[in-house]
Image (spheres, grey):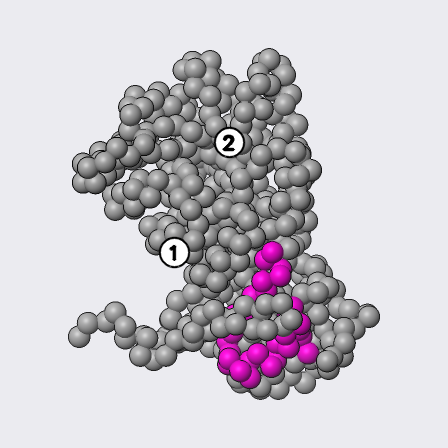
Amino acid sequence: MSSVLTNAPAWTIPGFLEARDNNHLFISAADATALTYQYGTPLFVFSESRIRANIARLQAAAKKVDRPIKFCYASKANSNMAVLGVVRDAGIDIEVNSGGELFKALRAGFRPDQIIFNGTSKTDDELDEAVRAGIYSINVDSIYEIELVEDAMRRARSELNTGLPPARIALRLVPEIGTRSHLGLQTALLTSKFGISSSEVLDAFRRGLQNPDLIHVCGIHIHVGSQTPDVEPFAEAFKSMWNHLMTIHRETGLTLEHINLGGGIPVNYLRDRSQADQLPEHERDMLGAELEPSDVLTEALRVAREAARDAQAEHLLDQVTILLEPGRSVIADAGVVLTKVQNIKRRPETNDIWLLTDAGYNLLLSMNNYKWYYHLISASRACTSADAQYKVAGPLCDSGDVYFDIERHGRLPDYRLLPRDVKPGEVLALLNSGAYSLAQMFPYNGRPLPAAVMVRDGGRADLIRKRDTYEDLLMNDVW
């Protein structure tokens, strides 16, 4: 058994990501290079223990604030059935964004009262499925959608010929709160497609109370966006929702059951900061954020309690359950993509060495969409100094399939640092790639989608997704 190095590289996480004395990357005691011999590349590798540790961190934050917190894992980040099973067994609930995610959540064993349903464009079929399942909350995205939920309830009662209880809904608000994340990841701005604006809130609640036999308004929801590096937007969002809750109580007598603060707790993508200086300052701040969930909850409750005291309404706050929808913070750093160098070329004119891998942006869409930084290391030579510069690119027939910002806006390093003399066959690892990768991959260029494994206790790896075959590329084609 290889031992862990005492002088560990900066990217290591003890007990999870380790460089051992055989010079290989180990993921929860499994030799990453050996996994590629067994399962091929590209390969997704997830750690059960790391998922559980990330969830335990959230649960510990709830204990610190001594409040009822309902954590609902944002399954859009990664809805692999084995991942959902680990999340369920770790003791938290789930958020879904489609009928397909609802189907998977139920199939994975989540109870209906553990499920909340988000989305801007829910279909009649999806609302029918949510209503008939009797889920905890449908987060409605517009006043118009309230009518759609009512219609779904009427259909369900008529077709099932039974007295289903009213569908539970929460209203999603968009209060114009900005963050220091990518604009494409900010969801509380009036320029985003999400939610009901502040000027419509009272009208929305009045509309929601018109037919209490069909729907029950149980909560209010704001999501400021993903990878939020500061506590202030969360606190501002919570205060905004709390003020709306008090106004609604004064005007209608309704006491809401929950306030949903959404997700957005960040992950530190820059544990190894060897290339951080090559990123713009705002990117460094966002990607290297280390915001504790307990700090988010503590500050949000502090500002709410101040407002509650001023309004002599602390009794209302004590009745409210807080919901959070963590996704990235549960799964991002629990996943690694292993890829093999297939080709190497040199450009004498520029003196560049190019490494061509078998993992393109069809597996890591955020690297193309947001120029997202995934730290790259050698899994074959994890202990060797990474001081040589390489241009790194994927296999797709697309000039944008590169590990740098080809548009030259400086949002990614121009070169990646790896050990000297990388050769074809060397295994590389893209760290922190568990979120929004497996869930978003697609078979561009007719490339079958890769396998995924879950590393369990003792370093045992279980296959949790079979590698596609060429036959799978034809599965739904008709000719």
* 38 drawn magenta: yes
Q: Quadrant of the image for the N terminus? A: bottom right
The residue depicted at 58 percent of the width and 86 percent of the height is: 424
- Mark 1 or 2 closer to N-term? 1
Which of the two residues, 171 or 142, is positioned nearer the viewer here?
171
The three-letter amino acid code for the residue at tag 1 is: Arg
Q: Which residue is mark 2?
A: 259
* 423 drawn magenta: no
Q: Quadrant of the image for the C terminus? A: bottom left
Magenta residues span 24-52
The local crowd at label 2, few if under 14, some if 14 to 19, many if 20 or more residues have their Cα within 10 Å, is many
Q: Is residue 109 left or right of residue 326?
A: left
Which of the two residues, 479 or 110, is positioned nearer the viewer here?
110
Q: Residue 478 placed where, x, y %?
A: 19, 72
Q: Residue 151 placed where, x, y %?
A: 23, 34
Whole-angstrom CA distance, mark 1 to mark 2, is 27 Å
Q: Is residue 187 left or right of residue 1?
A: left
Q: Residue 294 placed where, x, y %?
A: 67, 40
Q: Relative to residue 239, is residue 450 depicted above or below?
A: below
Q: Is there any visible trace of residue 369 in the rendered image?
A: no
Does dot 2 land on a helix, a strand or a loop? strand
Q: Relative to residue 234, is residue 58 depicted above or below?
A: below
The residue depicted at 43 percent of the width and 41 percent of the height is: 113
Q: Which residue is mark 1?
A: 107
The residue depicted at 53 percent of the width and 82 percent of the height is: 38
Quarter of the image for residue 307 reads top right
Q: Relative to residue 150, is residue 438 depicted above or below?
A: below
Does dot 1 land on a helix, a strand or a loop? helix
